[in-house]
Image (cartoon, helix red, strand yellow):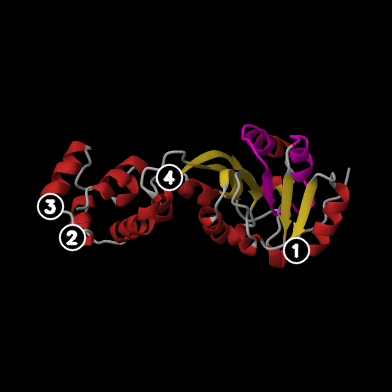
Amino acid sequence: MRTQRPGRHELGQNFLIDQSVIDTIVGLVARTDGPIIEIGPGDGALTLPLQQLGRPLTGIEIDDRRAARLARRTRPSTVIVHADFLRFSVPTAPHVLVGNLPFHATTAMLRRILHAPGWTEAVLLVQWEVARRRAGVGGATMMTAQWWPWFEFRLVRRVPAAAFRPRPGVDGGLMTVSRRERPLVDRRDQRRYQDFVQRVFTGRGRGLPDILTAAAPELSRQRIRRWTRQHRIPPTALPKSLTADQWAELFRLRP
């Protein structure tokens, strides 16, 4: 058995060693189509089995030593690039993203992914709490609500800290992100929509009707009351309780 080389602390490297998790990730990617881009392949725990899918595969590795070692172990059809994904220009053609993201850079990585063009599906291993929040478990976060019209977030499973080497201080969470074929809000309205969501999430009030009245003055009190009654939203509800469809509909209420 090949010995796992220790990760570099400054790069936040925690390598996946649990075969069941690896199999789950590869299985999720197998349900997709198109070329694959792997974020942070490390020593190839995912890269080597992903090769078995027989699709074009590119690994983006920030560690130059690991990139060189892995390139010697992969097939000619697999390309290993020494680069920082946060600065890497992803292709605009359709592709699939997969990666065990460094826990310390999860938020930055997710923002980069959501702004990136081209990809249709992403299979990502992140911190457990981040995965839960992005998937809206227990209520949506502002970031999730801001991107919901264009992406669907799904929590797949919890991944124990023991599945990594070196072992991190928290569990991981496996999640998928899918680009919607039919966006709930026109992409041309993205900036206005995201500003609207931010105003509502950061607005003050004892419940959603009060918050909307203060944060979105363009909506009349009468329209807000009628909409909340129609959706049976209690007066004490908070922005995190709204669904993707409700956010899109609420945005369209604006004059």
How would you rate the neighbour count of disc 4 (Cα within 10 Å): few for under 14, some for 14-19, many for 20 or more? many
Q: Is residue 237 something that shows in the picture?
A: no
Q: Say which residue label 2 marks.
A: 217
Q: Say which residue label 3 marks.
A: 221
Q: Say which residue label 1 marks.
A: 8
Disc 4 secondary structure class: loop
Could you tell me the amino acid type at mark 1? Arg
Disc 1 secondary structure class: loop
* Mark 1 touches mark 3? (CB < 8 Å): no
Residue toward you, 27 or 8? 27
Could you tell me the amino acid type at mark 2? Pro
Position above or below: 90 against 173:
below
* Mark 1 touches mark 4? (CB < 8 Å): no
Whole-number angstrom distance, CA of label 1 to CA of label 2: 50 Å
Whole-number angstrom distance, CA of label 4 to CA of label 3: 28 Å
Disc 2 secondary structure class: loop
